[in-house]
Every structure is written in C-alpha cells, then in structure tokens.
Image (cartoon, helix red, strand yellow):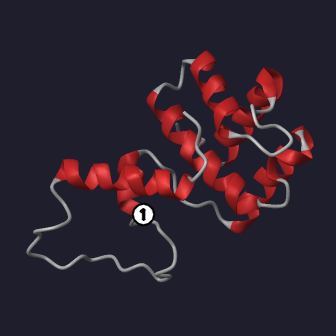
Amino acid sequence: MRVRGVRSAVAMVATAVLLATGCGAGDDKPDQWVSPDPTRTSVPPGREGVAGIPPQPDQATARKYADALDKIDRDVVNGDVEQAVDRGRALCVTVQRAPEDEDALVKETVATFTSQRHPKGFGTAKSKRILTAVRKYLCPDY
C-alpha cells in the first residue's frame, strides 16, 4: 500500500476507529477535544493511539530522526521533515501490527518512503535502515 497522503490515511484510520467504537455522529456529549489548528486534519491524540499511530515527536526527536534519514539518503527527507515524520508515524501502524514480520515491514517501508527520484522506493538495504530509524525515533515501544 502506498501512503501518499499520510494525513488523509491517518484521518481514514481515525474515522474507522471512531465508527467501530461508536463515537462520532449521534453522541449526546460534546466532543472533549478541539483542534488548536482547524486547518490540520488530525484526530485527538488518544484516538491516534488507539489506531496505532504514535504521538508526534518533539522537535529534538524529529530532528534526530531526520538526521538519521539524511545519513541513509538525503532524498528520503528532501527538506520536508514533517512529511518524513508523517510517513514514519504511518509505518508505525504496520510495525505495531506485525513487529516480527521483517519482510512485510521492509516491503511496506519501500512502498511508504518514495520520492521523485525514487518513485519505487529506496530499495531493500536502505529501507531496512529507514525502518530502523522509524522504530528508534518514532515508535520505540512497538
């Protein structure tokens, strides 16, 4: 599965969780969470966790993550740290579901991390290193 619009993928997962848990339309209680930035399509932090999406890293962790990816190939981040973080957080969902299935995780990493110069991903060797960085900085508990 290619993840091009990670935010839309996150929103779709969150919607599925909401529907499965009975939250959303028809609730008698007002929503307790209000997005501080209405232009962002994100879900409440607790609901992201239920969907398997780790929380946003702090700036220092995001920078270390981006630096690790830049050491693999500067084109992985390509100046867009936010997108690299979003892709990594989306990959964490798969890491949580199948932490021991290295082949599937590498295939998902190849499909998730693409660029204009690498439209089919960064290959197996680099994807293994990308996966290691994702696990270390974004979802170390999975």
* Looking at the image, residue 122 lies above or below residue 53: above
Q: What's under tag 1, amino acid-wise?
A: Pro
Left or right of 32? Residue 100 is right
Q: Residue at x 50, y 82 (%)?
A: 37
Residue 141 visible in the shown view = no
* x, y percent for residue 65: 76, 51
Left or right of 25? Residue 39 is right
Residue 65 visible in the shown view = yes
Q: Residue at x 78, y 61 (%)?
A: 80
**Mark 1 secondary-structure assignment:** helix
Q: Residue at x 75, y 29 (%)?
A: 127
Q: Nearer the viewer, residue 46 or 75?
A: 75
* x, y percent for residue 40: 51, 73
* x, y percent for residue 44: 39, 66
* x, y percent for residue 106: 66, 24
Q: Residue at x 72, y 33 (%)?
A: 132
Q: Which residue is mark 1?
A: 45
Res 135 quadrant in image: top right
Tell me the crowding category of disc 1: few under 14, some 14 to 19, or many 20 or more residues within 10 angstroms, Cα based: some
* Looking at the image, residue 30 lies above or below residue 46: below
Q: Nearer the viewer, residue 50 or 110?
A: 110
Left or right of 49? Residue 92 is right
* Looking at the image, residue 79 lies above or below residue 31: above
The N terminus lies in quadrant: top right
Left or right of 70? Residue 91 is left
How many labels were placed on the picture?
1
